[in-house]
Image (cartoon, helix red, strand yellow):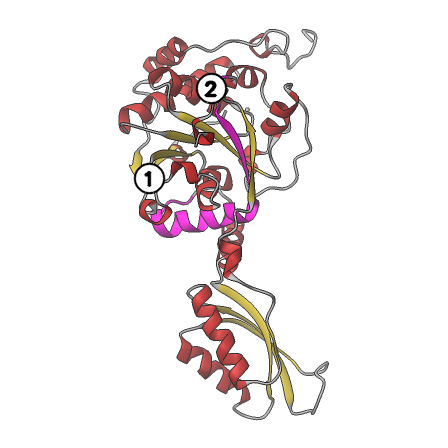
Amino acid sequence: MQDDVEFDENCDPNNPRKIKYDDILAASKRISGFVVKTSCTKALMSDRLGMDIYLKQEFMQYTGCYDHPNVIEGQGTIGIEIMEQVSGIDAVLVPVGGGSLIAGIGIAVKHLKPDTEIYGICTEKACSMVEALKKNERVSVTIDSTIADGLGVNMVGVNSFYNIKGMVDKMVVVKEDWVARAIMHTVEEERFVVEGAAAVTIASIMAGLFPNLKGKKVVCILSGGNIDTSILARALERGMAAEGRLVKFKVTVTDRPGGMAELCGMLAALGVTLRDCIPERAWVKGDVFSCELKIIAETRGWDHTKELVEHVKKHYKEYYFPEMGDSQTKSPSARRGPCLAPNPVCMQK
């Protein structure tokens, strides 16, 4: 192992380093004046989601992370900042890739307020920490393309894995569609542009994974803001489609003058925005004076979409809408990971 040119004695699998709170406190003093202390403000979406959510805006920090003890100590200073900025915290939600962020924050927060719950959040396509905890050892996993590419680490860090034990109460896995929706809501409601790796914490709350935190004070770590603009555009459209605000359908109209205009007039009267329209004439069954329109429209949500469906069905004989329903927005499309606490508060009746 020592012959490996990339070997770092501080990240030796055979000799993991134990990080203590005093190490983090020392790091906090060393970086004071050199590293920005990011804001931790109450989210505007708090009332809608039923808990006091505070957003730690680490996406304003220009740093990286990959397992070095000094890095974990530096990440832990976020925990100290949180405890200084928000009083009476009940839980902290942390994105997890290689694990250094949650290791450092967990050590600091548990030292300062031991009853605070620490939850690690990852996506279904990037969950190497969940697999490592299941097998109680670091394992290499295949990482698919993921919207949370900042969490796409195929093997967790030596020191990170060693230090999270006893610090993390539960790992939670959230589906990618919820992350897209979280990015959209963070942009719309908070005016923050964040990447998928940062949005997983908000996504897990939106997905209904934390009913035990209703009415409590929760800090969500937003850890990255360098999202590619093309991915941002896709995330916004995916989020809108998932919430019934973007809908596609087919409808057959008369191909005589005014046929398309009539449909457009109906959409306008309903307050529906026509995003795209592709006419199809060659493969339409029936008379030659019919035209099938493939429509993509923007609505205000599921209720508005249902109103659109009713009007189309009332005025046209031939139409097709993909199966839809607001149940998609209510069912928790995610799963909980392994519990790491001996007697977790979240499972107590």
Is residue 141 shown above or below 287? above
Left or right: residue 259 versus residue 86 is right
> What range of the chain is rendered magenta?
166-193
Q: Which residue is mark 2?
A: 167
Q: Nearer the viewer, residue 149 or 92?
A: 92
Left or right: 49 in relation to 230: left
Location of mark 1 (residue): 215
Q: Confirm whether residue 138 shows in the render.
A: no
- Report crowding for label 1: few under 14, some 14 to 19, many 20 or more residues within 10 A (C-alpha): some
* Disc 1 element: loop
Q: Categorize mark 2 by other alpha carbons within 10 Å: few (<14), some (14-19), many (20+).
A: many
Q: Is residue 167 magenta?
A: yes
Residue 31 versus residue 312: which sits nearer the camera? 312
- The C terminus lies in which quarter of the figure? top left
- Amino acid type indicated by mark 2: Met
Q: Where is residue 243 shown, x and y percent of the image?
A: 48, 58
Residue 103: give x, y in percent of width and height: 48, 20
Residue type indicated by callout 1: Gly
Q: Position of residue 186 (x, y in %)?
A: 40, 47
Position of the N terminus, as image quadrant, is top right
Label located before the other in sequence (1 or 2): 2
Question: Which one is nearer the viewer's eye here, 249 or 116?
Answer: 116
**Residue shown at 49%/13% (left/top)?**
69
